[in-house]
Amino acid sequence: MDADFLIIGGGIAGVSAAARLSELGSVIVLEAEEALAHHASGRSAALFEPRYGAPAVVGLSMASEAYFRSLPGVLSPRGLLLVGKAEGVEAFERDLVEMAFDRISVEEARGIVPILNPGTVAMAGYAAHAEDVDTDLLVQGFAREAKGRGARVLTKARVTGVAKEEAGWRVSASVGEFTARMLVNAAGAWVDQVAAMAGVRPLGFTPYRRSMARIPAPGGLDVSKWPMMFGPGEDWYAKPDAGALIVSPAEEDLMEPHDAWADDMVLAEGLARYEEMVTEPVTRLLASWAGLRTFSPDRVLVIGPDVREPSFFWLAGQGGYGFQTCPAASRLAADLIGERTPDLEAGLVAALAPARFG
């Protein structure tokens, strides 16, 4: 055997798993692109908001916080500002409660973000608990940890075939063939394709596109201390980024797995929703891009051995939560593979298991 564990996918899920599994045995990571974290991981909004997502996702995020706090520089203050129009009361109130916002006045909100339009913004809420995540620091830190224990992390290694053998798995890739005792499927939008290639029943993962645009700082203002802003029901968001703003329509458009790009019409609609809430028009774009957020049928991560083929391990369906859950998700994966009792509550572990899909 070339390795105990072969991980397909070098995004944050695969790289964090490599770091954890390197404590248990030999590891190979195969990443199809030229660099790690090329797809969804490299196009993240990079926010740690532990109250964001379904209950099981929140549980993983909360369990990840201690790890983030242990690493200097990974988290930095950002905050969240929820702004709504008069006709969106129901969605606004739901977000206010679910994400633990403090209700503030429009005047207070404009004190935080002075370009908010008092003619359209009718309600506001603020939460200080959201923080920026240094995603590159996390990815490189996990990769360095894995390599420090002897893991092989191979890029430009597109998987072309997966075969089950008596002793484990044989994986064909553009850089050669590899054998391993256990296969970890962390292939992002391609997880069901990898499963089908391996003769394992796909679970029904769905990739959705999300587009983003980078625009100049409105009015030439210093936006570095502004919070992330979004509309009720997350129908748009804006976030400071390297002296500019990134604005997203926060769309979920069904896609086949591919290297995604922004749809100009969808992006324009999102920018219009943002512009409606501010006094500064968008006059030009600095850049635009898109990523695929991949969800399981119940929109909760899938972490655990396949029901019918225990040597095939699912680490999939991160959706928009990959970075904020990766410490606890990767630790859970290592605990299950290493046959250790997880630190997480048993109900949460069950809520994440592939067995929930039968």
Image: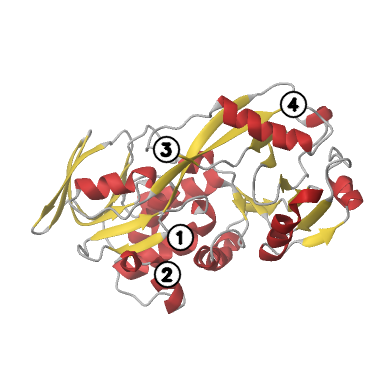
* Between 199 and 16, the one nearer to me in the picture: 199
Q: CA distance from mark 1 to mark 2?
A: 8 Å
Badge 1 element: loop
The answer to whether residue 112 is above or below residue 339 is above
* Between 313 and 154, the one nearer to me in the picture: 313
| CB contact under 8 Å: marks 1 and 2 | yes
Residue 307: percent from left, percent from top: 25, 66
Q: Is residue 133 left or right of residue 124?
A: left
Q: Which residue is mark 1?
A: 300
Q: Which residue is mark 2?
A: 351
Q: Which mark is residue 282?
A: 4
Name the amino acid, label 1: Val
* Between 103 and 167, the one nearer to me in the picture: 103
The answer to whether residue 165 is above or below residue 135 is below
Q: CA distance from mark 3 to mark 1?
A: 19 Å
Residue 343 makes an appearance in the image: no
Say which label, 2 or 3, has the lower sequence index. Answer: 3
Q: Which residue is mark 3?
A: 255
Q: Is residue 351 left or right of residue 177?
A: right
Q: CA distance from mark 4 to mark 1?
A: 35 Å
Name the amino acid, label 3: Met
Q: Which mark is residue 332?
A: none
Say which label, 3 or 4, has the lower sequence index. Answer: 3
Say which label, 2 or 4, has the lower sequence index. Answer: 4
Say which label, 4 or 1, has the lower sequence index. Answer: 4
Residue 13: percent from left, percent from top: 42, 52
Q: CA distance from mark 3 to mark 4?
A: 28 Å
Say which label, 1 or 2, has the lower sequence index. Answer: 1
Name the amino acid, label 2: Ala
Name the amino acid, label 4: Val
Q: How is the image coloured?
A: secondary structure
